Amino acid sequence: MIKGLHHVAIAVRSLEATARFYKETFGLPDPEKTEVVEEQGVKACFIDFGNTRLELLEPTREDSTVARFIARQGEGLHHICMETDDIVGELGRMVAGGIELVDKTPRHGLAGLIGFLHPRSTGGVLIEYVQVTGEGGAMAVAAEGRKIRVLIAKPGLDGHDRGAKVVARALRDAGMEVIYTGIRQSPEMIAEAALQEDVDAVGLSILSGAHMELCPKVVRLLREKGMEDVPVFAGGIIPDEDISALKEAGIRGIFGPGATTGEIIAFVRSLAAEQK
Ligand code: CO
């Protein structure tokens, strides 16, 4: 569900100069907080007034998307952001409706978990979603009761589990309880382990190319065992053209070789947050 417009963002050459302009011209307050998001090559801040909010984006590198935006068309309106309480669900609905995503899975932004839709499929407007998590909001899930429990499993025949182990370790370091099945598990073994371990999410690591067969089967078996609300995500070597079919089969998130462990942690937390 969309709760409202969260902010309107402007690409600028200087946060400081622009904030001063809005203050002197419109009497707006100083920016709330300024944050550098290194991997995006951007420095961002919010200016809150009334019940609305502006976001200013200043590039920190020549090759960042905001720098390229400014080089192309100068400073100006960059995107609008809609607030949702279910970003994972919204992105899934968009994919199912044929809308092209910039972010296949949510990532961390200034206000919480964010994801962008491609302006090519939204009438030329860059649209962002945000699910507000607040200060330490994502951590609150684990703090509120028991820790998030995740099963990391390797279905199929390939024996390379370095990636699965890296993800298991990262989730553990992020405060989750992680059960790793080891290699060469059948979908039946994975579903049974998920049931026995009472997990909140199941992550599948597949390099063998058998994802189209194995991933939907795990989802189906979980449903048969009454775990229809346990989300399944997958990582490994999965071609882009298979993504929408896997999402339709109930795989909630798909992470290619370029995905960072930070993205996967944020994603699992967002899954757990929506189950509360
Ligand atoms: Co924004």
Image: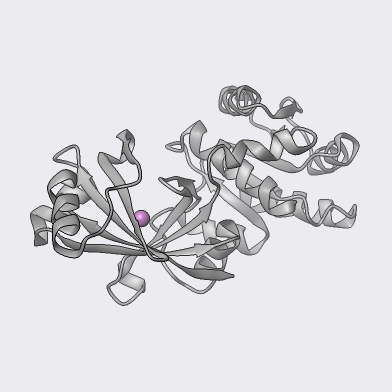
Residue 51 appears in the rendering: yes
- Specify whether 100 is left or right of 199: left
From the top left corner, tell me how far across and down residue 4 is, in percent. Answer: 48, 70
Quarter of the picture holding the N terminus? bottom right
Q: Is residue 200 above or below residue 174?
A: below
Q: Depth check: 170 or 6 in front?
A: 6
What's the coloring here? Answer: one colour
Question: Which residue is rendered at x = 79% and y = 37% of the image?
Answer: 145
In the image, taking residue 234 as reference, residue 116 lies left or right, namely left
Which residue is more in the foreground, 268 or 236? 268
The x, y position of residue 31, in whole percent, is 29, 47
Ligand 1 in which quarter: bottom left
Q: Residue at x 80, y 34 (%)?
A: 146
Q: Quadrant of residue 200?
A: top right
Q: x, y percentage for residue 162?
A: 57, 22
Above or below — where is 106 with respect to 195? below
Residue 181: x %, y % from top left: 76, 28
Q: Is residue 62 above or below residue 215?
A: above
Q: Residue furthest bottom?
A: 123
Residue 265 left/right relative to 32: right
Residue drawn at the location 53% of the way across and 55% of the way down: 131
User: Quick check: 79 above or below 147?
Assistant: below
Question: Along the line of sight, which residue is nearer the eye, 170 or 144?
Answer: 144
Q: How many marks?
A: 0
For residue 210, say whether it is visible.
no
